[in-house]
Amino acid sequence: MKKLVAYFSATGTTKKVAEKIAKVYGADLFEIEPVEPYTDEDLDWTNKSSRSSVEMQDMDSRPQVKNKITNFEDYDVVFLGFPIWWYVAPTIINTFLEQYNWQGKTIITFATSGSSQMGKTNDRLKGSCQGANLIEGERLPSFVTEQEIYKRLSKF
């Protein structure tokens, strides 16, 4: 089974975890990049007018993704990582998912967050990845070790 770690990382925290997961599982790595990168001001969750706040208030928001996986059909399992925003995945994750045919593929979500758990993340994502076996993984701290990753994700 060929594995991919696809991730969105606005500040670099999720990227660090994604790189460790890819190393542990011998998976390829793919960064989900927005066409318009997020600035610090965009990420200010205390400002109701910030870009991230506006996007997260509208679950139909679909920020554009800059890049696409050219050999997506080669993958059987995708570890999908993102920071938790407002107790769910950022809406750019829906944009990413809606670009591909997920029939027969397994998606294992993982997230980074200071304190928020996965919440209703998979409930909000399942409509964007029809046909996939969508598995809720784990919230992982940025300092997670490779051994801990294997222990926590190998059950999937």
Image (cartoon, grey):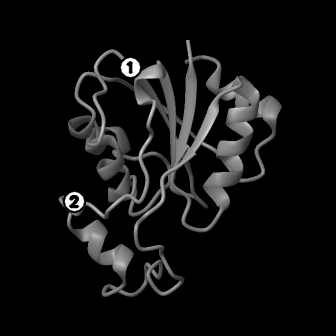
Q: Is residue 62 left or right of residue 22?
A: left
Q: Is residue 84 left or right of residue 16?
A: left
Q: Quadrant of residue 30?
A: top right
Please give the name of the residue rendered at 27% of the width and 35% of the height, measured from the top-left corner: 126
Q: Is residue 86 above or below residue 144?
A: below
Q: Is residue 29 left or right of residue 56?
A: right
Residue in the foreground of this view, choosing between 38 and 65: 65
Residue in the foreground of this view, choosing between 41 and 121: 41
User: For residue 72, which numbered disc appears in the image?
Assistant: none
In which quadrant is the C terminus drawn? top right
Residue in the foreground of this view, choosing between 22 and 68: 68
Residue in the foreground of this view, choosing between 46 and 94: 94
Of the residues tagged 2 and 1, which is closer to the observer?
Answer: 1
Q: Which residue is mark 2?
A: 59
Q: Which residue is mark 1?
A: 105
Q: Is residue 64 above or below residue 101?
A: below
Secondary structure of residue under mark 2: loop
Under mark 1, the amino acid is: Lys
